[in-house]
Image: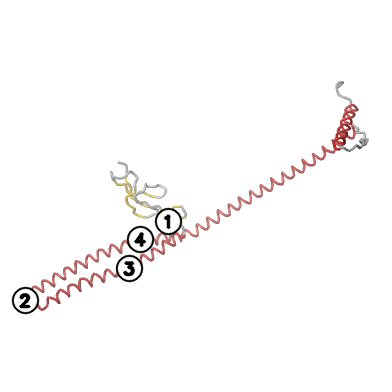
Amino acid sequence: MGNWPDHEAILARFRDWLDEARSESVSLDGVGLEPEPADPIGFCQLVEQFTALRQDVKLLAKATRGTEERNEATLLSLGAAIEQFRAVQAKEEEAADKAARPLVEAFVELEESLVRGRRAICQARQRILADVSAGVTEAARRLDDLYRTQPWWRRMLCRPWHNTAKAIYAGGTLDTYRNIFDALLEGYDLIQDRTQRAMRQLSIARIQCLDKPADPNRMTVVEVVSDVTRRPGTVVEEIRPGYCWQGRVVRFAEVKAVGEQ
């Protein structure tokens, strides 16, 4: 402790430095004012100032810690509120999905029924028109047979009537059935268009399967076929359509796919 500087010597040097700094400041400003005598600064006053400064620092640190604690509590409360909001939002979305799912499934069933109904009408149209055409051909053959059994003079007199009657019967019969089926198919097309428009508004989409790789997340392969001209796993036939709602699978598509060669 003998090498520790004397307190009075330190204070004296500090006062000399203050006097020199004040003199230099006055000379730079060009004002010839005499420096005012500074009050002597004692060690006790310096200790008091440092003590007050330390107390202020403690108070500031305490206030800072209090602010940090309040901010942390606020952040925790905000985080809890956000989690609660997310939980409520998830529950609301789940409830909305649960409420909308019957409607979505009803649209899916309706669209599938319309597709099957139109396919059945087209098949019936083709079959009935073929049967009617065969019946018209048979009726024309019978008329020709009956016509040939008539005397020559009667055939000569009735030939225009005979040909006209066959043409009217054949054309009128086929046109009648064809117009009936065309009108029915037109009505089906209108219903399908409206149904598909409503499905698009609800974000319901049919899964595209044909000539696509079999997707296990969207398709169920119910039968494996052999086809050397196609890559393994390629869908070659759609047995039952599948549907997605807002990107989620509502019903898996049932398909036939090419197996490993």
Q: Measuring from the top left, give residue 64's x and y in whole percent.
A: 75, 43
x and y, in percent, of residue 109 in the image = 40, 60
Relative depth, front residue between 217 and 202: 202
Tag shown at residue 152: 2
- Would you place residue 48 above or below residue 184 in this image? above
Q: Are marks 4 and 2 in contact (CB under 8 Å)?
A: no
Q: Give yes or no for contact between labels 2 and 3 (Cβ–Cβ under 8 Å).
A: no
Residues under labels 3 and 4: Cα distance? 14 Å
Numbered disc 3: secondary structure: helix
Q: Measuring 14% from the left and 69% from the top, which residue is drawn there?
A: 141
The kind of residue tagged 3 is: Leu
On the rendered structure, is 73 left or right of 40? left
Q: CA distance from mark 2 to mark 1?
A: 69 Å
Residue shown at 32% from the left, 42% from the top: 260
User: On the image, which quarter does residue 16 sit in?
Assistant: top right
User: Residue most toward the left?
Assistant: 152
256 lies above or below 149: above
Residue position for label 4: 115
What amino acid type is highlighted by mark number 1? Ala
